[in-house]
């Protein structure tokens, strides 16, 4: 005979694991988009959050240590520009910024629906479309990086 599931069992269940996975991605997307809305690109390599009087540090370790750009260099600036509707500037900072930006926006309804379904004890949406989107975004980011390095060796 099975007793009621303990909290520990619930946390280990595949659906609960799925819920925390969905929640982490949802919160990350919301956080990144919120920062992008609050941030401003003030100089070609400087992003600030004026409301907080903050200047974001250069996040890229490659750039700091080796002086070369990594595949993600320019994405923060591109996403910040896109959050403010400046597609032309975003394109200059990272040509794949729009793909990452669209991916971030799509996460909000997609992960919310999945969380809702999981809490209703239903399976999340089939992951095949999101998996394709993940790969498409990665390909765009790396293709941009490769293109940048081929054009400016
Ligand atoms: Zn970088």
Image: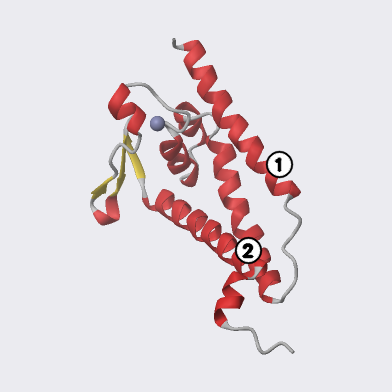
Residue 4 % position (x, y): 66, 88
Residue at the far left in the pictured view: 53
Q: In this figure, which residue is indicated by the disc labeled 2?
A: 18
Query: Is residue 43 or residue 116 the one in the foreground?
Result: 116
Mark 2, other Cα within 10 Å: few <14 / some 14–19 / many ≥20: some
Q: Nearer the viewer, mark 2 or mark 1?
A: 2
Q: Residue at x 59, y 83 (%)?
A: 6
Tell me where residue 106 appears, x and y as whole percent: 63, 52
Q: Is residue 12 above or below residue 34?
A: below
- 96 to the left or right of 134: left
Residue 8 is tagged as none
Which residue position is annotated with label 1?
132
Quadrant including the N terminus: bottom right
Q: Nearer the viewer, residue 103 or 115?
A: 115
- Image quadrant of ligand 1 equals top left
Secondary structure under the numbered disc 2 in the rendered image = helix
Q: Where does the image place residue 111, in percent across and percent down from the top left?
A: 62, 60
Give the x, y percent position of residue 131: 69, 45
Residue 46 occupies quadrant: top left
Counting residues from the start of the chain, the first of labels 2 and 1 encountered is 2
Give the residue displayed 46% in from the left and 45% down from the top: 84
Taking depth in this image into account, of 139 and 90 the one nearest to the observer is 139
| Relative vertical location of residue 146 with respect to residue 48 in this rendering, above or below | above
- At a point 75% along the width and 48% down the height, the residue shown is 128
Quadrant where the C terminus lies? top left
Q: Is residue 8 above or below residue 129?
A: below
Q: CA distance from mark 2 to mark 1?
A: 19 Å
Disc 2 residue: CB within 8 Å of ligand 1: no
């Amino acid at each position: 005979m099975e007793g009621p599931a303990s909290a520990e069992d619930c946390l280990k269940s595949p659906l609960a694991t799925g819920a925390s996975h969905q929640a982490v991605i949802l919160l990350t997307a919301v956080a990144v988009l919120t920062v992008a809305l609050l941030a401003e690109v003030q100089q070609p390599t400087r992003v600030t959050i004026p409301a907080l009087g903050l200047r974001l540090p250069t996040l890229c370790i490659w750039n700091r240590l080796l002086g070369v750009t990594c595949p993600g260099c320019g994405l923060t600036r591109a996403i910040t520009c896109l959050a403010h509707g400046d597609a032309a500037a975003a394109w200059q900072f990272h040509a794949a910024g729009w793909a990452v930006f669209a991916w971030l926006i799509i996460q909000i309804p997609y992960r919310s629906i999945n969380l809702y379904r999981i809490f209703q004890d239903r399976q999340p949406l089939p992951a095949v479309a999101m998996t394709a989107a993940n790969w498409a975004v990665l390909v765009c980011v790396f293709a941009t990086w490769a293109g940048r390095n081929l054009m400016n060796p």
